[in-house]
Amino acid sequence: MIEQDTIKLLRECDSGVRMGVDSIRDVLDNVHDASMHKLLSDCLADHESLGARIETLLHDYDDEGKTPPAVAKGMSWIKTNVRLALDDSDKTVADLMTDGCDMGVKSLSRYLNQYAAADEQTKDIAKDLISLESQLSIDLRDYL
């Protein structure tokens, strides 16, 4: 049971990290404020680093991870591009990113509770990702 919950939680973290990386990359070129650009760039690097840790653990379990669902990824891309086409301000970017972070925190918290038998290292990774998303949402409030 521990191994199955560990793998399932790692997959969800993998999907969440990938979604976060893609979302940040989608908006980064539209950011005008230098400090906001640095904030998002730093968060992107943190997501990529966490993603590498997750990949290593998944590899240890001979698992390929989980790609974000195509529908969710597509809807996010459409929403982002339509909103930015109408208004490419930092406020719009902050609004899009805080919505994404809040959804990520909610779903990752649900998975952390659902896969409670996962090993502690994997739970810590999930908590790190939740913390990263939560902090980004807080930091971006200054730009709303």
Image (spheres, helix red, strand yellow):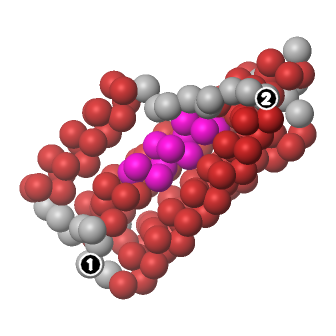
Based on the picture, tell me whether residue 102 belongs to the magenta stretch.
Answer: no
* Predominant SS of the magenta segment: helix
Residue occupying the far top of the picture? 1
Q: Indicate the amino acid at tag 1.
A: His
Residue 118 rendering spot, x and y as whole percentages: 84, 29
State the extent of the magenta-drawn residues as a range: 13-23
Nearer to me, 119 or 104: 119
Nearer to me, 68 or 95: 68
Image check: 106 left or right of 5?
left
- Residue at 45%, 68% in the rendered image: 40
Badge 2 or badge 1: first in the primary sequence: 1
Residue 70 rendering spot, x and y as whole percentages: 36, 27
Image check: 97 left or right of 122?
left
Q: Which residue is mark 1?
A: 32
Whether 81 is drawn above or below 43: the answer is: above
Based on the picture, tell me whether residue 22 belongs to the magenta stretch.
Answer: yes
- Residue at 37%, 72% in the rendered image: 143
Quadrant including the C terminus? bottom left
User: In this rendering, which labeled residue sits more in front, label 2 or label 1?
Assistant: 2
The numbered dot on residue 61 is: 2
Question: Local crowd at mark 2 within 10 Å, few (<14), some, or many (≥20)?
Answer: some
Q: Indicate the amino acid at tag 2.
A: Tyr
Question: Local crowd at mark 1 within 10 Å, few (<14), some, or many (≥20)?
Answer: few
- Residue at 45%, 78% in the rendered image: 38
To which quarter of the image does residue 141 belong? Answer: bottom left
Image check: 69 left or right of 81?
right
Give the CA separation, mark 2 to mark 1. Answer: 42 Å
Quadrant including the N terminus? top right
Whether 38 is drawn above or below 111: the answer is: below
- Residue at 26%, 78% in the rendered image: 32
